[in-house]
Amino acid sequence: MKKISVTVNGTTHQSEIEPRLLLVHYLRDVLNLTGTHVGCETSLCGACTVLVDGQAVKSCTMLAAQADGSTVTTIEGLAQSGELHPIQQGFWEHHGLQCGYCTPGMIMASAQILQRNPDPSEEEIRHGLEGNLCRCTGYQHIVQSVQCAAKKMKSKSVAR
Amino acid sequence: MAEKFVGKSVKRTEDPRLIQGLAHYVDDIKLPDTLHAVFLRSIYPHARIKKIDTSAAVKLPGVVAVYTGKDISQKIGAVPCGASIPEMKVPDHRVLATSKVYWVGHPVAVVIAENKYIGRDAVDLINVDYEELPPVLDEEKAADPKSPVIHEQFGSNVAYKMTAGEGDIEAALKSADKIVKQKILHRRLAPIAMEPRGVQARYYPGEQELTLWSSSQIPHLARTQLSLMLGMPENKLRFIAPEVGGGFGSKLNVYAEEAIVGYASMQLGRPVKWIEGRRENIQGTIHGRGQAGYIEIGCKKDGTITGFRYNVFADMGSYFQLLTPAIPTLTGLMLSGCYKIPAIQMNVTACFTNKMSTDAYRGAGRPEATYVIERAMDLVALELGMDAVEVRRKNFPAPFGGDQPFKTATGLFYDSGNYQGALDKALKMADYTKLRDEQKRARSEGRLLGIGVSTYVEICAMGPSPAMAAGGWESATVRIEPTCKVTILTGASPHGQGQETSFSQIAADELGLQVNDVTVIHGDTAVVQYGIGTFGSRGTAVGGTAVYMSLQKLKEKAKKMAAHLLGVDASTVTFADGKFTTKDGKSVTIQEVALGAHLAKNIPPDMEPGLSATSFFEPKNFTFPFGTHIAVVEIDNETGEIHFRRYIAVDDCGKVINPLLVHGQVHGGIVQSLGQALYEEVVYDDQGQLVSGSLMDYAVPKAAQVPWFELDSTETPSPVNPLGVKGVGEAGSIGATPAIVAAVVDAMAPYGIKHLDMPIKPESIWRIIAKKKAGAA
């Protein structure tokens, strides 16, 4: 067993884990944060995307032990004091989801895209989401959701 | 005036839980003391099991049980097939392999362990001694009497043969000026719902009740079948389809794993969970398509079609799943497309192969039909030197509807249609004439620009019960609670389609309430009255109609109650904006009526208390949505890469409840079509090994591979249901494939190409170009 300390959505957890435990299983089965999904176990679908120290990471192919000392943000940590994050708002307003299974990963990946580029073009959004598969939406509403979020985030930062 | 919601792009009520990671898919439901099931699956496509040694696995600490076929396959009933075709051969499909394995992925044993990691370790410790047998892999060669036989008791691999269609096909083809022939392949596809399958079971020994949570599109049908498989009373089995992460037909089924997990929980007295991995999903969840066909189409010089024949070998896989043998029959129904064709014949030879079963994948047999008739129309156009659009227009029936359906030579009566309307609109959006001019210019510059047009019609709102395997009606209970909040219990089982929202829109409008006054409950057989489920683009057209019918009953009862409170005759009361009003302006609100009906202190003497109504809607016919899709592509003549220039779709799904949801369905369907046309294929190698067994190798389209879709619609209401809706879940997956393939073929016309088989990869394009270059050099 290995001792780790991970800060997830602002709360620090000390855990003893099997060294082979995957980060996604740590989040889902140990911390009971089931918003992060498993869609392929091979880093290809992106449903398990979370932010580790601010970087979008496929948590199905990272060991929990590798996250020792890190700060992790999952979909559950995105909304602040009951208010949806602008990306969540964008997905809701533009019907950027249907079955919802890829959605947490899509939203976390979109957070990374907008962090790096607050004003992405359609092409940049599509390219940025290449690591995330959606089987329902055909992606167009997701692109619009991210564009909408970019606008919201811009006007918010201007207001500040 | 109260706000109206039907027809508006209302934001989905299901989204807040989904965008915050708060929804509960099967694997998110955590029960204390849960055991985990992990399956050992065959690594051979066809082999005899000589011996299974589980001793090392059983000894591993944390392993609670290991079951093999010998242990349980006779204790659990066979995996059911709900379809029936005269003289078809039905193999005995046991939940675990017994003497032979039939495909790579065939479950051989299952480990039940304290956690999934231990279960995986234990599976690796099971030793199976196989004797390899020659695999049968090609659906056409499988029919050859010299082929090895999969199910020895049948003496051949032919599952059934069937002929369908009407009219004198021989005379029709003889009367043609030209006959065009082509072999056409529909490769196997994997549905790839983003949430793989998953089952959780909990047995309550005191109550003798089993609860199964399973990612399913058909909770009630699955409960009936699983109660038979497990030998328990149906009313002691509670089946819950919780949040379901996509289905596309792959969860319109009853699987061995569902029964095994339930059985294990009953045996071991603890909850048991199984979550499918993606590799398992591609190996062991149903595939779609899988047809190799030969078309023959006869035409007059002016483009008039005289007759159409489709001889097809259909790949069943090694066993039947729920609807496996029925899928090619759906192809037969839709072979007329949106054209007047006096004689049609389909000859099916359905064969067993050493592969996973095929079954319903988005479109389920109808994409195959649309694809062959649309390819046929393009080939006729090429043969006659006509424009692809003109050949289509030549064979359209005049607009029809109301009490004037359109009869096809496949035995159907299309409900309503205006194929010219959708085509004209799409051509205008595309500026078709200008596009063709641009194409001429492009070709003169050596660029490969292609335009593909598909005019499709589909069969939806499944369907009239006599034509369905297990009833085609749908149910709904609508309850107005004492506080005038509305609860809808629907027998449909939406899993992404958004009916929690669209049904709420219908109820809000009918009752003069807000969308958020309504809650829609589905998927739990202990809560919802028997229903059929969500597939075949039926959710709104059949399930929504049942909701509408219940609302009418409720309004009738509420009006009677209101009249009683107002002291007038019910016939003099009008209902609008949530208020019941008399001729002289006195009124009561629906809130007052709802409370009064429940308190029951002052209700009409002949009225039962409460305000709840249940309806079962039995559709008299299917519905037939239609439309035109236009794809414009340009091919890089160095690399063979295909780039979309434009994509235009005009769809007509009858009345629209929520345009946002309709667009979502169309987008998603087009991308599944696009995947089929250009990327996706389940590949078994010549040894029967699955080489596209992960998402690295099975190419689901990504965001950057997909163009911007320009959508519009026409609206031809269906006369089949009072809402006038037709269904839209499969339009994109049916209408788009032929348009995309036609565009690529058209782009390659300078190379003499008339047809290309899907998926059209850059490699095959590059080879054509390279060969021509080599020839010229």
Image (tube, coloured by chain):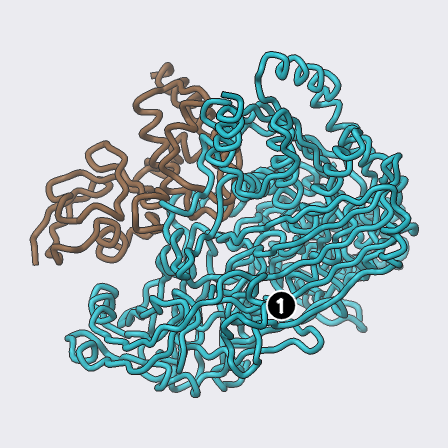
Chain colours: A brown, B cyan
Instruction: Give the class, few, some or many, for how many residues have Cα within 10 Å of label 1's Cα (few <14, many ≥20).
Output: many
Q: Position of residue B285 (x, y in %)?
A: 46, 61
* Residue assigned mark 1: B325
Q: Could you say which is closer to the camera, residue A36 or residue B608?
A: A36
**A2 with respect to B419 (left or right):** left
Q: Could you say which is closer to the camera, residue B602 or residue B68?
A: B68
* Residue B313 position (above or below residue B8): below
**How many labels, in total?**
1
Can residue B589 be seen at all in this image of the molecule?
no
Occupied quadrant, residue B465: bottom right
Occupied quadrant, residue B258: bottom left
Residue at point 24%, 32% (across, down): A55
Residue at point 36%, 86% (across, down): B70
Quarter of the image that includes the N terminus of chain B: top right
Helix, strand or loop for disc 1: helix
Occupied quadrant, residue B712: top right
Q: Position of residue A102 (x, y in %)?
A: 41, 44
Can residue B377 be seen at all in this image of the molecule?
yes
Q: Could you say which is closer to the camera, residue B242 or residue B452?
A: B452
Q: Position of residue B660 (x, y in %)?
A: 61, 37
* Residue B32 position (above or below residue A50): below
Tag 1: amino acid: Pro
The chain under label 1 reads: B
Q: Position of residue B628 (x, y in %)?
A: 72, 35
**B597 with respect to B518 (left or right):** right
* Residue B369 position (above or below residue B101): above
